[in-house]
Image (tube, grey):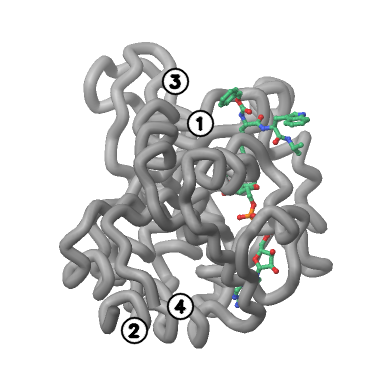
Amino acid sequence: MAVYRSIVILTGAGISAESGLRTFRAEDGLWEDHPVEQVATPEGFARDPDLVQRFYDERRAQVLAAEPNAAHQALGRLDREFDGDLLLVTQNIDDLHERGGAERVLHMHGEALSAWCRACDARHPWQGSLRDGPACPSCGAVAMRPDIVWFGEMPYQMERIFSALAGADLFVSIGTSGAVYPAAGFVQQAADHGARTLELNLERSAGSHWFDETRLGAASELVPQWVDEVLRA
Ligand code: BJW
């Protein structure tokens, strides 16, 4: 087992599936009940804000009720015990990585437990409903939306992510379908800079052919095994 100095991890909905949070593109996934263009685009929000606020109010409540699983906890352990550079980039809007003990976490698609005021640009921790039009605690305007990156919007902290990918010697993708850019392109960017690339997923993804190695199985089994390997090396 090689010794790594700089690891970038990308996680997707699959890592939270065993915590009871639905993925997007499975047959019983979120997009089955809620067409993506209705609930995950700025145009959908402009057309029917009540529908979108209700969708994210429900998601927020589900996040609060969920618990981190063995995969989140293993990554928390890695964050504590790995003394090289580490960046855990998640596409997930839940806070299960943080509750699993990880600190070096970047939420590139936003956070369910945060609200964003479109009037003054302030962001606020948020656990309740946004559907009834609460006033912004900073400016008082009634202009709060979920702090979520929808299709057509720029994901958060891309410069920091690209810089970490350029310096990584290992890139690991966990539980993501590789269907959404720019995250789907990270494997190629990391490989172009010389990183080894590893995918951990329940089944092969759209991007599996880009990885040096793919391991198939449930995140709650594969992730703790892989973390043991890294920390033993
Ligand atoms: C398990 C498991 C278990 C299950 N264990 N595994 C044409 C070409 C290229 C790009 C584009 C294009 N046309 C448009 C675009 C851009 C667009 C895009 O990618 N569209 C595609 C549909 C083609 N992207 C954007 O608009 C993004 N912005 C952008 O590109 O800005 C411009 C830019 C330019 C230059 C640089 C940077 C940016 C924004 C994307 C925003 C995505 N937002 C969403 C919703 C908001 C968050 C939320 O509500 O939660 O984010 S969409 C949705 O998909 C969500 C997810 O984060 C994201 C990825 O899904 P994920 O996590 O992969 O879930 P699934 O369900 O797809 O897969 C689950 C996986 O888990 C599966 O593989 C299972 O096998 C696995 N699994 N159980 C292990 N137990």
Real-space Cα separation, disc 4 to disc 1, in angstroms: 25 Å
Real-space Cα separation, disc 3 to disc 2, in angstroms: 46 Å
Between marks 3 and 1 in the image, the one whose residue lies nearer the viewer? 1
Residue toward you, 12 or 18: 12
* Residue underneath mark 3: 143
Mark 2 or mark 1: which comes first in sequence?
A: 1
Q: x, y percentage for residue 206?
A: 77, 55
Q: Is residue 23 above or below residue 164?
A: below
Q: How many marks?
A: 4
Residue shown at the point (33%, 50%) measured from the top left: 87
Between marks 3 and 4 in the image, the one whose residue lies nearer the viewer? 4
Q: x, y percentage for residue 91?
A: 51, 49
Real-space Cα separation, disc 2 to disc 1, in angstroms: 31 Å
* Residue underneath mark 2: 228
* Residue underneath mark 4: 223
Real-space Cα separation, disc 3 to disc 1, in angstroms: 21 Å
Secondary structure, mark 4, is helix
Tag 1: amino acid:
Pro
Residue toward you, 111 or 126: 111
Mark 2 or mark 4: which comes first in sequence?
A: 4
- Residue 155's mark? 1
Mark 4 or mark 1: which comes first in sequence?
A: 1
Q: x, y percentage for residue 166?
A: 41, 37
- Residue 221's mark? none
